[in-house]
Amino acid sequence: MKFYKTITLILTIALIFSACLPSKSIARPVAGPDYWPTQNWQSSSPEQQGMDSAKLADMLEEINQNKTNIHSLLIIRNGYLITEVYFHPYTQDTKEHIQSVTKSVIGMLVGKAIGDGSIKSANEKLVSFYTNRTFSNTGAKKDSIRLKDLLSMSSGLDCQEFSGTGTTMEQSPDWVQFMLDLPVTTTPGQQFGYCNGNAHLLSAILEKTNHLNTRIYANQEIFQPLGIPFVSESDWGADPQGFSLGGFGLHLRPKDLAKLAFLYLHHGKWEDQQIIPASWIAESTTQQTKKEDGSGYGYLWTVYPEDGHYAALGLGGQQIHVYPQKDLIFIVTAGLPAFAEAPEIEKMLGEFILPAIQSENSLPENAAAFSRLQKAVEFAANPLQPIPSLPDVALNISQQVYKFEENPVGWQTLKLDFKPGANTAQLILNDSTPVQVGLDNLYRLSNTELFVDLLIRGSWTDKTTFVIDYPYAISGPIKLGELGATQISIKYSEDAIQTTIQPLIFGGEPIVFNGVKINN
């Protein structure tokens, strides 16, 4: 009898909760967690949570074999971490630039502010927050823009972010003024139009209404209760006026992203505190507009009504996926081509992770498959390979100095030093301190007067070509976790070399320049 009373109570609560949800909301009732991962996530085998280790092992083995540029991968089911992978040189402590997942955090903060009363509702008008400011292109359409239109990327502001013409917000001296000055080209609330500036205006509004920098507000109201370490200015930058970046810029660890997903999965509740109103979770995961690719868009979350999940999507493969009906969270960070739709991640979900779910209950343990999975996890973190024999040219050019023609990256001279049987080589640019180059498939860390925390590995791809892997953009901050990857190819022929620098994530034409050997 007690069992039937419990089931009846659960069903009654579910019906009441479902009645409160918007008709298209993807949020669904989920069982209360066995624990809250404020301090640490608890681990479990996939089989204990109804998932097949063999499928997950197949996925990781394919990623390792294809050298897909995934940085991290976390799978959480029923509140337990069943797969946690960090691909060398990334670790659990690497703070990733989560790109546009920052927008989803801004959406959380707007919901928090509405719950706290500092913002009345998502129906408030944009112009009501700037009554003392003068801006261009005024009129009825601009006056009608609501916060919910910014949240759903349907403000109608002529952002032209990807047009390739004109000044962008990021190039302007005052980002908020730039956005407020824009003309309105479509009726607000009617048409999806992706724009970083929509989220940035929300960040500025959060600061105006809370009288607190958005980064500090996030630290106090969301990150700290979840056990996410304090986010400093270096991990969440600001515009020229000091407003925290709204469209991108936040750096978090993969496990921090998992906590944000867990907060949403549990309708804004964490331990005994309702951090974000459950009604906001429901509304923000309801399709408000439709994106060009046919998927839906809520409040700074992409929603997929057909398969009942929502996602935060960032450039280059920084992604959060939440499946409420399956009690599943998938976190991935990556360095994939920036302007592609990350088909590699779609494949991971469609061919491996979702098919791995085989039961709502525990499955029999599969020791062999679980062992394969663990070995794939270990190889991802430490992909050590035997040191290959050096080609003859390596010893012939070792310690020889090559002088370059003028080039866009400012390289003047280059010298490589190879020793038979060594697991590293030395690279010397412009007569600076030597940089270590791993030859066993592992990156080596160097700190020089030119570079700090520089990671490099290299290999001979044929008898005359040495290729260097560089997990950064060729120009930009040398910081692991920033979106960037570059391949540098050095081809030797008699007393000359040709160097080709190819950006791997943002694309573009390779940089090619030549050099000649000079006397030491």
Image (cartoon, rainbow, N blue to C red):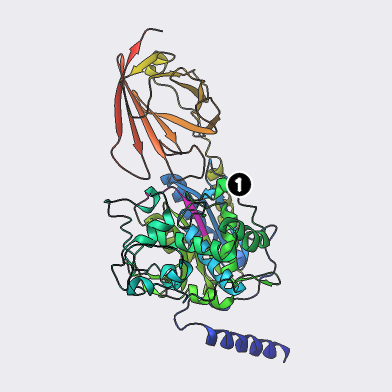
Vertical placement of residue 382 versus 2, above or below:
above
Question: In the visual, does 37 lie left or right of 296?
Answer: right
**Would you identify the image quadrant in which residue 276 lies?**
bottom right
Mark 1 = which residue?
93
User: Which residue is nearer to you in this view: 259 or 101?
Assistant: 101
Residue 206 percent across, percent down from the top left = 54, 64
Q: Residue at x 44, y 14 (%)?
A: 399
Q: Residues within 10 Å of mark 1 (few under 14, many from 20)?
A: few
Question: In the visual, does 335 lie left or right of 75?
Answer: left
User: Which residue is nearer to you in this view: 12 or 232?
Assistant: 232
| Circle count | 1
User: Could you tell me if residue 31 is visible in this image?
Assistant: yes
User: Which residue is nearer to you in this view: 261 or 298?
Assistant: 298
Magenta span contains residue 4:
no
Residue 128 percent across, percent down from the top left = 46, 71
Write down the region rendered in magenta.
Answer: 331-339
Vertical placement of residue 281 versus 453, above or below:
below
Q: Residue at x 48, y 44 (%)?
A: 482
Residue 257 percent across, percent down from the top left = 56, 58
Residue 37 percent across, percent down from the top left = 67, 62
Vertical placement of residue 469 versus 370, above or below:
above
Q: Quadrant of the N terminus?
A: bottom right
Vertical placement of residue 365 versus 16, above or below:
above
Magenta span contains residue 332:
yes
User: Could you tell me if residue 52 is visible in this image?
Assistant: no
